[in-house]
Image: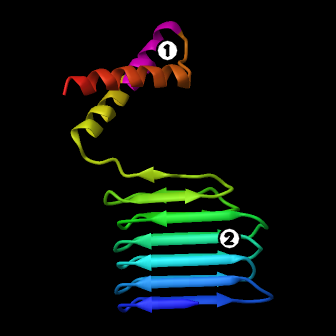
């Protein structure tokens, strides 16, 4: 079933023996396309975004995009797989059950993928004082770690770095 409102375009297509396809688009230049051979696919696009979902097996693919220029693409071709993709505010996200996910958040939006090949829930870091302080603390910790390893030929492991970052960012945050 395809539903388009307010100058959006939607296409839902089921080929072969079975499956379910749904596409919903609302808003000018919004486009939602779903192509299903088997399984369940759903694409939802709004406010000038594009969403595409496709299945080639008894699996489930869901793509949701919103905001001008936003793109979400979800596909599956292995039985039992579930792939969910979301992109907001013009962000880009793509996921499948055969390749690593790709997430590119933009404009303070969300680019998120949940799939058998991995997840990438990334949100754009707000341009706030706390965000800038945390970033500065991470850069300082990185310089400290590299000078420390040169000094005693000992590389820091990830838990040590995380512990150091927590201590640095907490002390920086309290000084604001």
Q: Which residue is mark 1?
A: 149
Query: Disc 1 vs disc 2: which is toward the camera?
Result: 2
Disc 1/disc 2 C-alpha distance (Å): 47 Å
Q: Residue furthest left?
A: 176
Where disc 2 sits, the SS reads strand
x and y percent of residue 43 in the render?
54, 77
Where disc 1 sits, the SS reads helix
Of the 4 image quadrants, the one containing the C terminus is top left
| Residue located at (54% from left, 64% from top) | 85
Front residue of this view, candidates 5 and 8: 5
Q: Which residue is mark 2?
A: 60
Front residue of this view, candidates 138 and 22: 22
Left or right relative to 17: residue 98: left
- Magenta-drawn stretch contains 57: no
Give the class, few, some or many, for how many residues have Cα within 10 Å of label 2's Cα (few <14, many ≥20): many
* Among the 4 quarters of the image, the one containing residue 87: bottom left
């Amino acid at each position: 079933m395809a539903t388009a409102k307010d100058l959006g375009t939607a296409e839902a297509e089921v080929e072969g023996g079975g499956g379910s396809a749904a596409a919903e688009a609302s808003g000018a230049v919004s486009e939602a396309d779903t192509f299903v051979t088997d399984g369940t696919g759903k694409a939802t696009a709004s406010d000038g975004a594009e969403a595409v979902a496709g299945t080639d097996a008894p699996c489930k693919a869901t793509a949701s995009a919103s905001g001008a220029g936003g793109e979400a693409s979800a596909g599956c071709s292995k039985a039992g797989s579930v792939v969910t993709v979301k992109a907001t505010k013009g962000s880009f996200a793509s996921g499948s059950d055969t390749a690593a996910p790709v997430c590119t958040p933009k404009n303070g939006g969300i680019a998120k993928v949940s799939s058998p090949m991995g997840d990438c829930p990334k949100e754009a870091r707000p341009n706030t004082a706390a965000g800038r302080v945390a970033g500065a603390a991470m850069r300082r910790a990185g310089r400290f770690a590299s000078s420390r390893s040169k000094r005693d030929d000992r590389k820091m492991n990830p838990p040590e770095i995380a512990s150091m970052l927590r201590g640095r960012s907490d002390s920086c945050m309290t000084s604001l």
